[in-house]
Image (cartoon, helix red, strand yellow):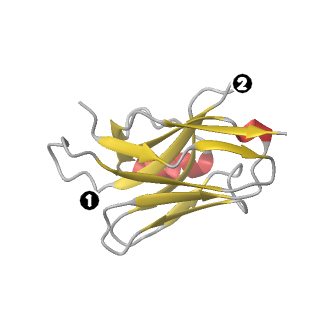
Amino acid sequence: QVDLVESGGGSVQAGGSLILSCAPSETATVNIFTNYCIGWFRQTATTEREGVAATCIEGGATYYHNSAKGRFTISQDSTKTTVFLQMTSLKPEDTGMYYCAAGDSGMAIAIMFGGSTQSSVGYWGQGTQVAVSS
């Protein structure tokens, strides 16, 4: 069962931009966007899956890992049904699979400090591929 669906990945040249979207799947059995924080993670050729940014649906607080500060912006739409990750000034090292996940506030804080999110993520998407060429 797929609980979250990502979209917006693609191929861009270095310096380009992409906007990724994350929304609950049609088959999700719970309202994942209620009372959860949504995080964006990525897995590259040289790194394990790591969190880059998160936002908590209620309140709208945002959290960024150092690697994302200044270039990535996480936001949600006014209906609180989609979370976006706007990525600018993309670099070849940003190439990888990007996933969104739903978890508690511990996930968001762990993303900010680069800590483990293993125990705080409840739902995952299947990912969307981002390729940045030099």
Q: Is residue 24 left or right of residue 67?
A: left
Dot 2 alpha-carbon crowd within 10 angstroms: few under 14, some 14 to 19, many 20 or more = few
Q: Looking at the picture, which amino acid does disc 1 mark?
A: Asn
* Spot occupied by residue 127 in the image (x, y as percentages of width and height): 46, 36
Asked whether the beta carbons under mark 2 and mark 1 sit within 8 Å of each other, the answer is no
Mark 1, other Cα within 10 Å: few <14 / some 14–19 / many ≥20:
some
Q: Position of residue 55 (x, y in %)?
A: 45, 60
**Position in image of residue 92 (x %, y %):** 78, 38
Q: Residue at x 14, y 43 (%)?
A: 29
Residue wearing tag 1: 35
Image point (18%, 41%), residue name: 27
Work out whether 51 lies above or below 19.
above
Foreground of the two, 110 or 74 = 74
**Residue 91 in sight from this viewpoint:** yes
User: Of the residues under marks 2 and 1, which one precedes in the sequence?
Assistant: 1
CA–CA distance in space, label 2 to label 1: 33 Å
Determine the image quadrant of residue 119.
top left
SS of the residue at dot 2?
A: loop
Classify the position of the C terminus by image quarter. Answer: top right
Taking the image as shown, residue 57 lies to the left or right of residue 66, namely left
Image height of 35 relative to 118, above or below: below
Quadrant of residue 28 in the image?
top left
Indicate the secondary structure of the residue bearing disc 1: loop
The vertical placement of 128 against 47, above or below, is below
Q: Which mark is residue 128?
A: none
- Label disc, if present, on residue 46 of the rendered structure: 2
**At 46% across and 54% down in the image, what residue appears?**
21
Choose between 8 and 52: the one closer to the eye: 8
Give left or right: position of 95 versus 24.
Answer: right
Instruction: Pick out the residue farthest to the left.
Output: 29
Does residue 101 appear in the picture of this structure? Answer: no
Residue 93 percent coordinates (x, y): 76, 37
